[in-house]
């Protein structure tokens, strides 16, 4: 990337980034994106972004991700889980399907009653947990998959979460 940076535009560099790195990074990300080894791929992603933009090794990439509208690995992983949720609506149960009471959590998914840790780190359970943390205006569009995915992608490209814990600890009520 460094050798061709002088000769091509930023847009072409982004195309090269998506072709070489993003395509490989996103393959199977729904399964490995939350593993402990994903930090190595995330560091590589930030390194490539720094080369792409010509900044120093110690400079933060958070603003670069937002400005270039590139999802950091943790955000891309969360986004892939939410795409799975949108494509497989029938396997998830909302709280208003469980009971008739109009509670504040009526749009949230009902957590399956499991105690096995392996299941809790799986795609289904993570999908419930991640979906329930979304802002209400995004959950309201869940029936329209195209609009839902579009809003989710916009939300994550604007927030640029660097970890799953950062997403869980964020105050999504104010968004």
Image: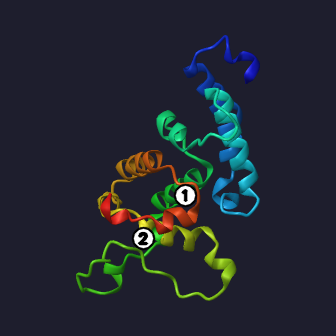
Residue at image location 66% in from the left, 85% down from the top: 116
Q: Note whether 27 is above or below 85 in the view shown.
A: above
Viewer-proximal residue among 29 and 167:
167
Residue 23 or 174: which is nearer the viewer?
174
- Residue 132's label in the rendered image is 2
Which residue is disc 1 drawn over? 78
Instruction: State the residue at coordinates (31%, 87%).
Output: 99
Q: CA distance from mark 2 to mark 1?
A: 12 Å
Total labels drawn: 2
Q: Is residue 23 visible?
A: no
Q: Residue 42 placed where, x, y %?
A: 68, 49
Query: Residue 160 at what x, y percent from top left?
Result: 50, 49
Image quadrant in which you'd find residue 12: top right
- The answer, for residue 17, to whether it is visible in the render is yes
Residue 95, percent across and down?
Answer: 35, 80
Task: Tell whether 165 sits left or right of 134.
Answer: right
| Crowding near the residue tagged with mark 1, few <14, some 14–19, many ≥20 C-alpha atoms within 10 Å | many
Q: Quadrant of residue 32?
A: bottom right
**Quarter of the picture holding the C terminus:** bottom left
Question: With 50 as the anchor, is 144 left or right in this view?
Answer: left
> What percent of the width, then of the height, locates residue 45?
68, 42
In the rendered structure, which disc, 2 or 1, sits on the residue that comes first in sequence? 1
Secondary structure beneath dot 1 equals helix
Name the disc covering residue 145, or none.
none
């Amino acid at each position: 990337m460094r050798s061709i940076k002088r000769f091509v535009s930023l847009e072409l560099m982004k195309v090269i980034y998506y072709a070489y790195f993003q395509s490989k990074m996103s393959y199977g990300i729904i399964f490995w994106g939350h593993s402990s080894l994903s930090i190595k791929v995330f560091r590589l992603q930030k390194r490539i972004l720094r080369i792409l933009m010509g900044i120093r090794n110690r400079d933060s990439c958070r603003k670069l991700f937002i400005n270039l509208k590139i999802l950091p690995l943790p955000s891309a992983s969360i986004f892939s889980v939410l795409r799975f949720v949108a494509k497989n609506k029938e396997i998830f149960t909302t709280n208003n399907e469980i009971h008739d009471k109009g509670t504040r959590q009526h749009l949230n998914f009902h957590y399956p009653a499991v105690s096995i840790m392996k299941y809790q780190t799986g795609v289904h359970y993570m999908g419930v947990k991640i979906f329930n943390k979304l802002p209400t205006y995004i959950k309201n569009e869940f029936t329209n998959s195209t609009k839902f995915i579009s809003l989710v992608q916009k939300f994550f490209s604007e927030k640029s979460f660097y970890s799953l814990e950062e997403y869980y600890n964020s105050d999504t009520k104010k968004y």
